[in-house]
Amino acid sequence: MELGSAVHYAGNVLEMAERVRTWEGIGLDVVWVAEAYGYDAPTMMGYLAARTERVQIGSAILPLYSRTPALLAQTAAGLDHISGGRAILGLGASGPQVIEGWHAVPYDRPLARTREIIDICRRVWRREPLVNDGVYQIPLPAGQGTGLGKPLKLINHPDRTDIPIFVAALGEKNVALTAEVADGWIPTMFIPEQAADIWGGALATGAKARGADRGPLRVVAGGALAIGEDVTALRERARPNLALYIGGMGARERNFYFNLACRYGFEAEANRIQDLYLEGRKEEAAALVPAALLERTSLIGPAGHVKERVAAYREAGVTILNVNPIGADPVADLEQLRGWL
């Protein structure tokens, strides 16, 4: 497995960039840059490209709706060029709250958009004149503009014409599509012991339709990391974030993370967490996050326990173990973890 970590959208990006430089020196393979409604991810990704030498730099994720397909392709090609071929384009649908509440774009047809954007990006990188007839009408048809648009191709010659594309997906149809057309899959709240039961069918469906030229699907998953005899209390730090995702990341009737918690067998707890969270009782909601969920979605505990967790992720097909070091000595923890991959 490769070793990955993420730059969160709510932190101090300059401090985190320096942290990535240090971690690169001890074997970090991939850094992921998130984007929500804070600073944009590509700016940070470009800065990381200038400050690092070896680590792959991925977006996790750029929302499908906030940029045109051509701009997504341009951004990835530009980053790939300045980084010397280290870019990964991570895409995802995000959710209605952000897409409609922040970007003022209707949250519609996520599956069709995902498929078309991936195809368009690859055609842009091959420098084909861009024409598309689907969700995205390219060039814009007469009657929807001046009528002067014409097919264009990328001016630059990309360093790579097949930049890796990863997709964040949780729903069955979206996971199947990801397994069919993407290079990698980014699930959230991933429990390796239950992955086959939750996503095995969708992954198999997508794999059957996958082109032989795409190679195996890479899988990015992991959790908080802390290694030691007296670190299990650190799992508690994940309570507020899990409560946010299960209870408040989306509307009551449309929350992908709530649905996943239910599929894991925590339906009663998820319903109560959601009720409390939407009532503004966030601390009470966090207190109800199941201890089993905290343990199974993290790599926190004595060395033997964490080593077993690594084996579980490997057995579940994870190829990039993505961790968030939260222990007292993150460098030491990463170095020890690196030796088990």
Image (spheres, rainbow, N blue to C red):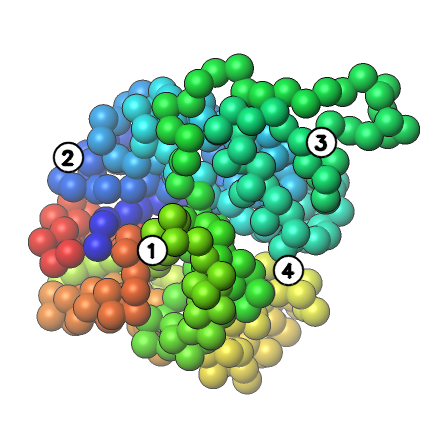
Q: In this rendering, does residue 302 appear at all? A: no
Locate residue 144: give its quadrant.
top right
The one of 285 and 337 positioned closer to us in this rendering: 337
Q: Mark 1 or mark 4: which comes first in sequence?
A: 1
Judged left or right of residue 56, residue 302 is: left
Other residues around mark 2 within 10 Å, as few (<14) / some (14–19) / many (≥20):
some
**Residue type beneath disc 2:** Gly
Query: Residue 49's x, y, as percent?
Result: 33, 25
Q: Residue 76 carries which label?
A: none
How far apart in space, not on screen, are marks 1 and 2 (Cα)?
28 Å
Q: Mark 1 or mark 2: which comes first in sequence?
A: 2
Q: Mark 3 or mark 4: which comes first in sequence?
A: 3
Query: Residue 182's x, y, as percent?
Result: 46, 50
How far apart in space, not on screen, are marks 3 and 4 (Cα)?
31 Å
Residue 22 versus residue 312 in the image, above or below:
above
Q: Which residue position holds label 2? A: 25
Disc 1, SS: loop
Query: Residue 229's x, y, as percent?
Result: 12, 68
**Residue type beneath disc 3:** Ile
Give the quarter of the figure containing the N terminus.
Answer: bottom left
How far apart in space, not on screen, are marks 4 and 2 (Cα)?
38 Å
Query: Residue 298's x, y, as percent?
Result: 30, 65
Residue 232 versus residue 217 in the image, above or below:
below
Q: Which mark is residue 250?
A: 4
Q: Which residue position holds label 3? A: 138
Q: Mark 3 or mark 1: which comes first in sequence?
A: 3
Tag in front: 3 or 4: 3
Q: Residue furthest right?
A: 143
Locate residue 304: give its quadrant.
bottom left
Tag in front: 3 or 2: 3
Q: Residue 216 carries which label?
A: 1
The one of 276 and 107 positioned closer to us in this rendering: 107
